[in-house]
Image (cartoon, grey):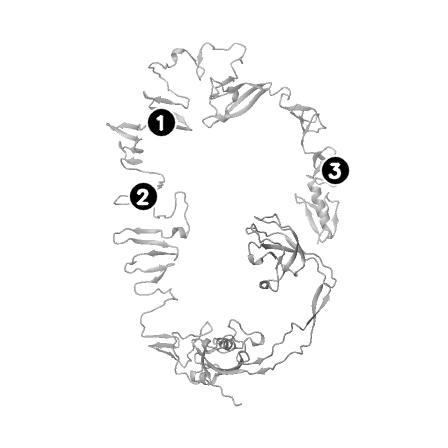
Amino acid sequence: MSYRLNKTDGSLLVDLVDGQLDTTSSDLTLIGRNYSGFGEVLNENFIQLLENFSNTSAPINPIRGQLWFDTAENRLKVYNGSSFTSSSGTTVAETQPNMVAGDLWINSVTSQLYFYDGTRLQLVGPDYSTAQGTSGHQVVSVLDTQNITQTVIKMFVGGNIVGVHSNSNFTPTVASRIAELVTVANPTGTIVKGFNTVGTDYKYKGTATIAESLVDGNGVVRTADQYLVSDSDDTTTGALTIQNNAGLTVGLNQNTKLQFTNNAFTIANQLSNQDVEIKVRTPAEVSAFKIDSSASAVGIYKASPTATLHVGGNAIIDGNLTIGGTQTAVDTVTLRVEDKNIELNLSSTGATTNDAGANGGGITLKSTDGDKTFAWADGTDAWTSSEWLDFATGRGLKINTNTVLTETALGGSVTGSSLTSLGTLVSLDVDDVNINGSTITSQNSQSLKLSSDTAAIEVLNNKRITGVGAPINASDVATKEYTDGSAIISLQLDVSGFTQNAVGNNYLNTREVLETLYPVAGYGSGSAEPPLGIFVNSVIPARGDGALARVLTVDYGVGGGFTIPTIDFSTLKNYAQVDQTVTVQQRTISSVQFGAQNPSLGTTTKITTTASHYYEGAQTVVITGTTVVNGVSANIDGNYTIQAAEFPAESPNFVSFTINLDTSAAGWGSATCTVGTVERTPVVGAANKQVLEELSNASNVTGSITFAPTRKLLQFGVNGGAWQFDREITLTLTS
């Protein structure tokens, strides 16, 4: 079926036919379902999107909103439904470019911005060129020491600041100071309301009104008599405001300072151990608030506080009370808590812990006779109590609104139980089975049946089942008498080479063979090695204590068997010379053991590789790329002769050999080398290898061959769940 491809506004662009390419609906090639080789087309579409159809000519099948980078003008354009127009990008150039309405141009020579309205070029700013330097007003924000952002206007002429206009008085922060206003007379760079000139030589030419009088902040002209004096007592009928952070200092020794510091109003003692006290009259003069600096204590209606906070009366806290520390003591006879829910294990921030963190939480009633606790235990996921729970008459225990236990009975909702013991019952009826005393009786002519979800019914404590009749059916229980009389095992066993075949070792090897053939535990589908294939249901029955086995052993080894004369073949070997060609077999060195480290190496060095080799003695090897640490040489690279190439502990995959590199001298004892490669030098055959061709006729062989096996009849029995040797039975054979 075809793809119906819609534009963003929901209108149909094209109904794309299966297996076809569409190159006319848009400037992208649209791929129909199941089109072969779509990868190239898809990747080229991505490339065209990345470069915005970069070309000197416009795309031929544009869609409204499509972008096109015009390489002729180096400008990004957009299709508006009828034509491509400029995307209003900004052009930076020394001369005016070809512009359309809405275009911006930055003159890179004068550093000024222009826009084109379609008719003429308009200067946006700045008003001054680069050559003229910064001139005019500049609006900036300045942060004052009260953390308030102030707006000021800087005035520049020819790149130099000449003054600052401000609508308020303030002191800037250190980082916000205007450097040109910081002088010896004004070290903090304070800005006053009005025009703040830079330097004293910048002046306004003309006449200023009210120049001979002082003008207050409200514009009222004041005379000198209307201002407070600093060298004598004085009185004002107006409000007194100290509009600076230094504040007010009181006392002959500048004892106390009221000031604004770090965005806070502070009352600071200037002298050590000087108290602060606020007094009221009630009508007598009393201390309403006292700070004892030497004791680091605060008293509220407590003239001599003895704690960090000491309240000399009742305290009402309308908000929340959070108490830190490790202990809170409430010394009161009656404790009232309005909240009906008490929360534990919850911090002031609302943080809590998991069950492990809540372990041991609850209520503890202190007592000299032992604490009484009701606590949560994470290990049991339950509340635990150290004491009895005594319910009132008529009350019991409920779970999910259901009564499960009362004073005299289990609740009706209890349908199951995991009780492990009961009191003594006289009798118990369960369906058709009666239990009375030590007798279990099947009633109503029903058979008594025993069943287990496991594979067996187990009789505990090694007790016997008695009164069993003789077995009739294959699945009937066999009595001991029946088993002992019909299940004796007899076998003949070759014990030649058994290393433990003596009475002193209880014929251990023979017992192991017997256990393998007739395992005491039995052999079946549930054993460790169950039968396979067609024998999957076959079993070897288990053997109980008392089961017997008789084993006739035959020994062709020590004490019997074959006696063959010795033949010396050393003089009978004949050799022939053959061609041997050895190709390069490079191996990576895993370790090098020097003679100084292992005196048994003598004047040779042991090389160990990461993979097995096929080198032989007297061959030549080339070692490269080694690095010796703490040795007498930087490396051991070079050509060497193989002294020995077989180490039996590595058979059959030999990885070590020795070379004629003498490192037995002192200085090599601490050397190590674990890098490098070793390879044989190629060898071309020329009768260079000797092999065994034949053995000569051993005409000198003399002697006789004797055959005298040793036989024993051994009896074993099952005891304690294992085959045990019983005795050796005298074996009499007629010659």
Q: Determine the image quadrant of residue 484.
A: bottom left
- Identify the residue position indicated by label 3 in the image: 55
- Identify the residue position indicated by label 1 in the image: 267
Is disc 2 in contact with disc 3, using a CB cutoff of under 8 Å? no
- Secondary structure at numbered mark 2: loop
- Decide: is 554 above or below 392: below
Question: Which residue is painted at 39% across and 44% down in the image?
Answer: 347
* Residue 208 in sight from this viewpoint: yes
Question: Which residue is painted at 69% across and 67% down in the image?
Answer: 691
Q: Nearer the viewer, residue 168 or 682?
A: 682
- Residue 355, position as x, y percentages in the image: 41, 52
Please state, as top left, top right, bottom left or bottom right, where the N terminus lies in the image: bottom right
Q: Are there few (<14), some (14-19), or many (20+) residues within 10 Å of tag 2?
A: few
- Residue 287, position as x, y percentages in the image: 27, 29
Q: Nearer the viewer, residue 620 or 599?
A: 599
Which of the two discs, 3 and 1, sits closer to the camera? 1
